[in-house]
Structure formats: C-alpha cells, structure tokens
Amino acid sequence: MLQKREKVLLLRTFQGRTLRIVREHYLRPCVPCHSPLCPQPAVCSHDGKLLSSDVTHYVIPDWKVVQDYLEILEFPELKGIIFMQTACQAVQHQRGRRQYNKLRNLLKDARHDCILFANEFQQCCYLPRERGESMETWQTRSIYNAAVWYYHHCQDRMPIVMVTEDEEAVQQYGSETEGVFVISFKNYLDNFWPDLKAAHELCDSILQSRRERENESQESHGKEYPEHLPLEVLEAGIKSGRYIQGILNVNKHRAQIEAFVRLQGASSKDDLVSDILIHGMKARNRSIHGDVVVVELLPKNEWKGRTVALCENDCDDKASGESPSEPMPTGRVVGILQKNWRDYVVTFPSKEEVQSQGKTAQKILVTPWDYRIPKIRISTQQAEALQDFRVVVRIDSWESTSVYPNGHFVRVLGRIGDLEGEIATILVENSISVIPFSEAQMCEMPVNTPENPWKVSREEEQKRKDLRKSHLVFSIDPKGCEDVDDTLSIRTLNNGNLELGVHIADVTHFVAPNSYIDIEARTRATTYYLADRRYDMLPSVLSADLCSLLGGVDRYAVSIMWELDKTSYEIKEVWYGRTIIRSAYKLFYEAAQELLDGNFSVVDDIPEFKDLDEKSRQAKLEELVWAIGKLTDIARHVRAKRDGCGALELEGVEVRIQLDDKKNIHDLIPKQPLEVHETVAECMILANHWVAKKIWESFPHQALLRQHPPPHQEFFSELRECAKAKGFFIDTRSNKTLADSLDNANDPHDPIVNRLLRSMATQAMSNALYFSTGSCAEEEFHHYGLALDKYTHFTSPIRRYSDIVVHRLLMAAISKDKKMEIKGNLFSNKDLEELCRHINNRNRAAQHSQKQSTELFQCMYFKDKDPATEERCISDGVIYSIRTNGVLVFIPRFGIKGAAYLKNKDGLVISSGPDSRSAWKPGSLQRFQNKITSTTTDGESVTFHLFDHVTVRISVQASRCHSDTIRLEIISNKPYKIPNTELIHQSSPLLKSELVKEVTKSMEEAQLAQEVKVNIIQEEYQEYCQTKGRSLYTLLEEIRDLALLDVSNNYGI
C-alpha cells in the first residue's frame, strides 16, 4: 500500500533560475535493497547490481562524506558501499551536474561494489524534516535512520559502519544501535584500511585543503575579486536583459588577458551578435574555462579589441605593445551559474623555485598543463619529490580573498616527457577514463572460440531475410582492417532495375538496452583514436569478430536496400530490415581502385581468387568488376545530386612513409585519394540520410538526428579577404554559392591556394551536433555541409553509441510499421536530449585527444633532430594569415600549421640578404591587409604576402609544464627547393606507423639508457591500451565517416 506525502524541492535550472516545486511523494513498503542477505528477495525485486557477499561489513557514507571524499570512495578496494538517496540528492543539488554524474557512473559501473538505496521512498526509512531543523541535520538523521533499518532488514547479520564528518552525529549515534557504528571517515580509513596508502594520502590532501580554506575564510584578507551576486539577483538580471548568460571560453594563447563569453540561447540584446570579450583576470572574477557565467556589459567607451598579434604561450600578463583590432562588446563576470571544474594535470615548480619559497613551505603554486586554467594552490610537503612528474589535482574553492584557486593533490600520472605519462595526461585533460572491460560486462558477451564457435541460430534465421545465396556482398576497407562494420551489394532485378544494398553490423543484437555493456558503451560514447593506439567502445569480441563483417563467414546485419531505375538511378522503393549475410570479398581500397581502372593483375593479391580454376576465376572477376563499376556510377549520380544542392567538399591526402635499409624514415611520398573512397562514402551518406527520414517519420519527437547549422557570416571575413588577395570572390550566402566559389578559386600555378581556402572555410563552420527531434523545429534539422534536409549516423555502431541508438529506433520503426509490439523502451525527448549532450561532449573530447596525440608525436619526431643540420627540419611553407608581428604558416609536407615571428623578443625584425637568407636586424614592421613589410634601420625591406611560399626551419619548443610545441622560423623568403617537387603540393597531418614506431622506440631506448627507476606504478596504462594501432592514417581511415572524403571530418560533422 502506497502512502502519499508532499515534498518541497528548490531546484536550479540549467539557465540558473530557482524553481520551487511541490511534488507528490509516495512511500512504499518495499524498495530494492540490493543485498544478498535480503530475507525477501522476491518482494524487494532486485534489478541490476547486488552487493558482494564476501565483505565483513557494509559502509554507508553521510552526505558530507559523499561530497568531499567521492574520489576515495571510487577506490575499487572499498567494497560493500551503500549510497543513500538522501546523500546522492545532496550531491546533485550542492555540487552540480559534473560531480553528480560521476556518482551516477560509479553506481552503474559493475567494477565497483556499491549500490543506491532509495531510502526516501521506503516507508520505515522516510523521515519528514522537523520545523526549524537544518537541512544538514535532517540529512544526517535520515541517513542514520536508513542505516539502522537496513541492518535490521538484513536480520542483523551484517555490521554497518556509517562514516560522517559530523562530530555531533558521532557522539549522538555512535553507540545508539548495536551493530551500527558511526565513526569519522578518517577513523574508518585508519582502522579498516591502514595499508591503503593511496587513500590515506588523498584523504590527508583533502583535509589539508579544507583546513587551509577554513583558515583563509577566518582571516581578514583584502578582497582580490568582487563577490559574486546572489542567485536571485542574477536570475532577475538575466530576465530583464541587464545581464547576459554564456559559457566562458579562455584564449589559450593569451590566457591571462583574453577570454570570451559565448552566448547561450537568445539574448535580449538584439544588437549583440558576437561573443563578449572579458579582458583580464579581474574581469573574469574567479570563473574558469567552461563555466556557465553571468556577464555585465561595460560602457562602450570601455570596450576593447581582440588581440591580433602572435603570442607565445608564456602565461605572462604583458600585452607586448600589440595593436588590438576594432573594439568589441566587453564585459565583466558578476556571477557563476555552473562550475565546470574537472581533474587537472599540473606540474610542480622546479627545485630552484621550491627552494625560493623555503624548505618548509607547504602551500605550492602548481601550473596546469592547460594554458587556459590558472595556477592552483595546493598544500603538500612532497613538492620536491614530485617536481619531475605530471600530477592530477582538483580545485576545491576559489575565495574572493585569494588570487588563485585552492585545490588538493589526487594522484601521479607519470614522468614528464615519458610517452605513457604524456598520453595519460591527454586522457585526463579530456576527461577520458577508459579502463578494461569488467568481468560482469564480459560475461554478457557471446562466446566464439575454436572449441565453441558461434553460429547463426535457427530462431534468427526465421526472423531475418537471408541474403547469403542471393546477393553478392563485399566490403572495401583499408589494408589490415579488422573491424568491418559495413558492406555493400549491387544486383540486377528481374524487371531490369538495380538493387543497391548497404549492410551494417547488427551490434544491437548483442548489446541489450541497459545491460552492463550498454551502459559502459553509453558512457564511453565513442571509440577514441590516438596516434599509437585506440580505446574501443565495445569489447574486441564484438568489434573485431562477431560484429565485424569479415569475408566468408555468416554475420547478422541491419540492411537498407533500394530499388533504383536502371538508367536514371532514381530510387523507386526502399526496404529496411534485419538480415543474414556472408561477405564474398574483403577488398582493400587500392585493389578495388585497380579493378575499377581495369588493371586486373591485382587479382593475385585478393585471397578469395587464389584457389579458383581459371573459368570460375574469370566469371567471378567479371561479376565483381561490374559491381564495383556500377556502385561507382551510382555514387557519382548521388554525389552530383547533393552537389546541386550545395554539398561542400574539402581535400586531403595520405602521406606514405618511405623507409631506408635500416628501417629509418627516408621520405614522405604523397598519395592521391582514390575515387573508390568517395564511392563507399556516398553509399554511407545515402544510408544515413534514408534512416534519418525513416526514424523521424515514425518518432517525430524522439528521433536522434545530426544537424549542421549554417555558419555565422562574420566568421567568413578572413576567408573572403584572403581569397580577394588572389583575385577570387567567395560568395558565402549559402552552401551552394560557397561550394561553387571554392570550386572556382583555383590558382593553376599553386594548388595549395585552393586547399588553404577550403581549410579556412572549415574553420568558419559551426560544429555538427546530435539532437533530439522533439527539441528542435523541423527547419533546424538541415545539414549544411552535406546539403541534406535530414541526416543521422547509422553506419558505424561498432564505434559510435549514437549509431546504436539509431539502430534501436530503426528496429522500433519497423515494428511499428508491422503493428508489432516495440521491444524495449525508447528514450523520451528529454532523456535523448541529455544523451545527445553527453555524446557531443565525448565527440569533442575524442577530436581534441586525437589532435593532441598527433601533435605529441610530431614534436617527439622532431625533438631529437638538429634543426641546423637535419634536412628534414627544413621545408617549404605557405603563408596563410598575416598578424601584426608575424605570419601563420602551413607546411604541406608534414601537415603542420604554426606561427613564424617576424619580430623577435629582442625587438629585432627579419631581413633578407642578397641570397634571400634571413637575418635579425633592428627595424620595424608595417602590416597591411594582405601583406606585411619588414624594414630595417639600414633601409632594407622585405615583404611577405598571403600565399607566398617561404623556406621554414622546424624545431621544437620544449616546456616543463605544458605540451611541447612546434616552432617555425622563416630562413628564406623564397620557396624551398627539394628533389621531389611534388611534395610541395601535398599535405597531411597523418604519418604512417613507422613514424609512431620510431618515436616509441627512441623513447624506450632513452629510458633504458638513463636507467631511471621510478616507483610509480604504471601497469594500468598498458591495460588501458586495448588495441595497439598500426598507424595514424590506418586508424583514422578505419573510421571512414571521418575520412577526408566524408565532409563530416572537416566540419566536425
């Protein structure tokens, strides 16, 4: 029998408003206890995790312990933890979404022995708050009352330890109930886990940080920053239009001076279309990159301009006398609605800096790896011991009396400059936590071993359309690809029309909704591709085996098949459904292209042809060549149709590594993209488009689609000006006019010009995002880059969770058409929108980590080479942007973009001698729209224009606290002449596996030579690395939707 109560909640919305909500609150006699000692498991109806049966006691943390010590409760050694609903809600309402999501993920994770008990819905556990009782006292009383009930519910068979930071609670409840112990968290660790050193160190760090905070608040320091306005004042100001809400975005190149607030939603300031500049740390008022802030605009006479000078990341506050651009809306932060604090990787000061602060100093200023984050003050006596390591810290507070935020030490990552330590840094900085799949998750996986091979079940044979004998199905992939998630088919029907098929691995057959592996895949959201490895979203038994559509084996698929007119290729009918396929050929791109071009000698490299007699071989070859040719014809037709609507295309190429006899990198040989790449990409885009239409028609308010909004016109200004310098006009009014303009902007003497213009167009693009159709108007569904009215991701469920959601939606849509029951609950619009936000966030993290790891290997590659003598450190560069004190240069050969200064720190400017070699001399710079002139005091002058080719020396600028960076120096104002002139017109940031291997090998040899003995345990990082990648290119090419011919990569689509 349910008992009805009323509960008053004060909730803060994402926009910062406080809502008072009165809810009906129903109490139940039974709620799941998740204990194996439950006397009535059928009544409690346990779903999901059960507590371990081999623990000596259960632990129930008070609300304050959950808030302050969650990172210790995450230790896998701590078992039998019961999180009360009261404590979890306290975290949600007081610590924000990020901390609450960490707690939710901990509860879902099968690797951690912890459960949630809904004490506020249990009749005997629920306690109403008494009049005059503080919220904190009520929360502790409720949690203790629930702990007593839980002890008796388990028939007094398992002692319960409630850990709290409330000394009064320890005194009051400590000996009240036999079998229920109430002690402090520090006391619990000392008595129950005396040997868990890492937990004790972390606990001491948190306690020390709290004491420092309390001492600071008691001391009467002068205010360093103004106090933040009360929440109700901020809400009223936002509503009236006096204040503006947005997300703080710090300029990493001028982190101490420049930040911008990106507006959220519509602003009442109709004339405000650009970001708001926040100039200086005082105006930033303790907000940190990523925070949701409230800004007050300054009077127009106080507006400042964006800095246009090149600047090194030296984190000083000097403006270096640069001339800013036109004044823009400028403001100051008056409040923070949502803190976006996370784990930060930092570096301790050097030995000399520590000594200058005194040997007994406990408060240490550590420097974050991310330039955008201010220095953090932590309390530790280990500063000298940790100065050579990357360390993780967390921010606890930032009081108005403190110049810097206060934080605490969490853990050590690895030694500075060590490959594994630097990779771990990239993962932490992008909030990527990918640990090995748990035993519980792997238990859900199907078995496929030589002793027990997996087979197609009879039940599935009856449900699915069997294409094994009727269709020629084949895949086209990179060489060595293991995870084949898509195949193609083409055949002639009896009526003469064609049937085109796209067959995608049926991942959702093996991944049940809300299973352990589904929750893990949802949390990861994507496969993360780094330079030398990848972190898979799904276990390899699926991604590289049963969900990989390999040649000659039976596999489950989800297929789309179109009937096409035999001449016009217009679509007549479409069929969606689950199928069984057997891929006839596993082709690699180069072989498919050779067959398309009529070069049949490549047949010897295709294993499926090897054991055939000549007649069968010839017949099958003709069949395959016809299929590839017909697919390419159809792809050209589909592409032409999208081109007519304004589809955009950017260019890119692969660079192949040429090795010498000693396996050292000898040269980089460019390779042109193949037409067969585009054939496969167009078929995938077509499938994604038709699935998008289908799921939207069936579920108009809860379908997951992908939108790409048109870019803001002001972002195209640099593109238009650069094109104008070469005599081209870029019309950016629509995607069609932009695509046509870019096609026409070709310099016959320099193909790099068009490539750079397309790159600038990419930079101006908005990011494509997943969204729920119930939260957007239909006119906002449009995909600008692909010129499609509706688009989604369906073709890569092995490595994208969005595709798994779309597969389930498609299956539900098919069931709905057949008037069958829809199996499994679909996400509501609200839940789907939250999931889309999470996936979009994880996609950004994947892009950033991929870029950062590529830059890491580029720096490691050049680091050990002498720029003065090493030929590979000299290269041709193209100027693509002019600044007040230098230029931005693109190096086609290595795909590197960077700054080249024309004025150095000593105030000398670059000059050019009779042999065109550069030198530094006293003088001045004069910047124009499309050029910059350097004039020495002797009267010599040299001018650099947009798109000029110059000779550049590449070196590495090392940094203790941050990532190393590539440094470019112009050594001649003439193009660099190299024997293989074709390289001048090629570009790629992707280097083959030999580059990665060379860097990795040199790092290992350096470590062995130094014989450094480190006591930091790093085995976990080897476990993280689930799949060793073969190369940057191969890894990226394996996700063909990110390939250069699929514009989604270039626009963040």
Image (spheres, rainbow, N blue to C red):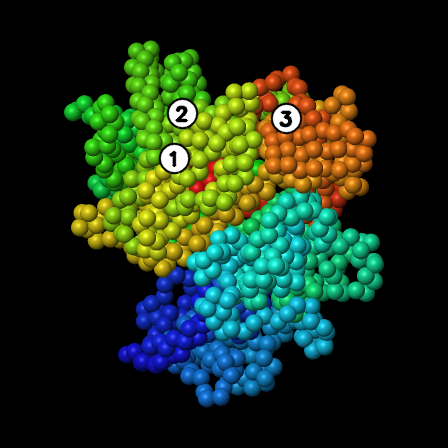
Q: Is residue 42 above or below residue 823?
A: below
Q: Secondary structure at mark 3?
A: strand
> In the rendered image, which residue does mark 1 sit on?
736
Residue at position x 34%, y 35% from top? 645
Closer-to-camera residue (563/753): 753
Closer-to-camera residue (417/922): 922
Image quadrant occupied by the N terminus:
bottom left
Mark 1 vs 2, N-terminal side: 2
The residue type indicated by label 1 comes to Lys
Residue at position x 73%, y 33% from top? 934
Closer-to-camera residue (682/734): 734
Crowding near the residue tagged with mark 1, few <14, some 14–19, many ≥20 C-alpha atoms within 10 Å: many
The residue type indicated by label 3 comes to His
Percent x, y for residue 96? Answer: 51, 66
Closer-to-camera residue (1028/642): 642
Percent x, y for residue 766? Answer: 46, 45
Relative side of 771 to 923, left or right: left
The residue type indicated by label 2 comes to Val
Residue at position x 76%, y 36% from top? 909
Q: CA distance from mark 1 to mark 3?
A: 31 Å
Mark 1 vs 3, N-terminal side: 1
Crowding near the residue tagged with mark 3, few <14, some 14–19, many ≥20 C-alpha atoms within 10 Å: many
Q: Which mark is residue 676?
A: 2
Percent x, y for residue 1025? Answer: 55, 43
Residue at position x 49%, y 74% from top? 232
Q: Secondary structure at mark 2?
A: helix
> In the rendered image, which residue does mark 3 sit on?
949
Image quadrant occupied by the C terminus:
top left
